[in-house]
């Protein structure tokens, strides 16, 4: 059974940093691209970032809204996905979902609140 | 960036009624790159329709999808109470991947 379990969310002040983690299991993690998708309270879905597999040189892609502030990474040896978020803004407040490859599997999400 | 515009944003349908949600794409994309998700309150989105018209596992056959180029739609042939949810279209034709703003479907 595919499982994606996010952690690391919480309350952070504007301009602060936070690192989200996603523990993956139930599939061969190192062969799949992975994504982060977020959803602000009461709002729609926003794709945030994607990292491809080693065979695709771990290529990364970002939404313009987070480029140069967020960094997606992975540890294939631990089946872990990460999102390092720096210089956080109030508009980054959202539920952050870890999502496999082509969006067939989603985690339950971890809530990030950016507020003074 | 490819922009997806969904309509309507909110609608209500009676049991048994036919429902159609549309997704207009700002630039033509291959139909294999247009997908739909269902989300119910306080839960993660679920894949619903892949590649314009392919139902995800477990999706009732009263759902269907169609379209090409810049115009796509999701149709429910006969509304049921369990179909009340928010539906999102999405493209992964090019980066950044983008979602439509969502259509909230309520039961009358």
Image (cartoon, coloured by chain):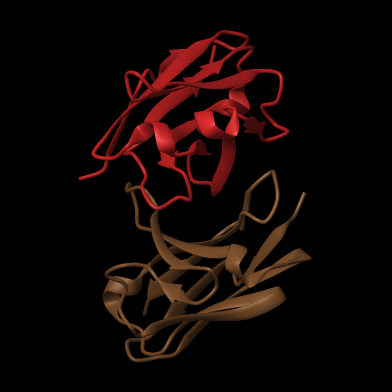
Q: Residue at image x 36%, y 70%? A: B84
Seen in the picture, residue A73 relative to B84 is either above or below; the reply is above
The percent position of residue B2, horizontal first and vertical second, equals 75, 55
Does residue B103 lie above or below A11 as drawn? Answer: below
Q: Nearer the viewer, residue B72 or A35?
A: A35
The image quadrant of residue A91 is top right
- Residue at 32% over, 37% down: A28
One can see residue B26 in this view = yes
- Residue in view at x 48 percent, y 67 percent: B50
Q: In the orientation shown, which residue stands out farthest toward the left?
A: A1
The picture's colour for chain A is: red
> From this viewpoint, is residue A52 visible?
no
Drawn side of residue A59 relative to residue B84, left or right: right
Q: Determine the image quadrant of residue B90.
A: bottom right
Left or right: B27 in relation to B96 = right
Find residue A92 and report its horizontal and vertical position in percent. Answer: 58, 27
Q: Which residue appears farthest toward the front when viewing the image?
A: A55
Measured from the top left, where is residue A101 in percent x and y?
Answer: 47, 44
Residue B3, image x, y percentages: 73, 56
Question: Left or right: where does residue B94 sit relative to residue B11?
Answer: right
Chain B: colour as depicted: brown
């Amino acid at each position: 059974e595919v499982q994606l379990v996010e952690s690391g969310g919480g309350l952070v002040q504007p301009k602060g940093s936070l690192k989200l983690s996603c523990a993956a299991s139930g599939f061969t993690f190192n062969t799949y691209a992975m994504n982060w998708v977020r959803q602000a309270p009461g709002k729609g879905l926003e794709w945030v970032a994607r990292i491809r597999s080693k065979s695709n040189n771990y290529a990364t892609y970002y939404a313009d809204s987070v480029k140069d502030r967020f960094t997606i990474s992975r540890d294939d040896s631990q089946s872990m996905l990460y999102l390092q978020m720096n210089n956080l803004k109030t508009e980054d407040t959202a539920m952050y979902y870890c999502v496999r490859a082509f969006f067939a599997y989603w985690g339950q999400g971890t809530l990030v609140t950016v507020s003074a | 960036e490819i922009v997806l515009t969904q309509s309507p944003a909110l609608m209500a349908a009676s049991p048994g009624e036919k429902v159609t949600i549309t997704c207009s794409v700002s630039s033509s994309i291959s139909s294999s790159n247009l997908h739909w998700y269902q989300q119910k309150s306080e839960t993660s989105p679920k894949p619903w329709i892949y590649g314009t018209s392919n139902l995800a596992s477990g999706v009732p056959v009263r759902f269907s999808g169609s379209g090409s180029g810049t115009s796509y739609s999701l149709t429910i042939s006969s509304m049921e109470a369990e179909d009340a949810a928010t539906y999102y279209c999405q493209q992964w034709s090019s980066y950044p991947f983008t979602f439509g703003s969502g259509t909230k479907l309520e039961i009358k």
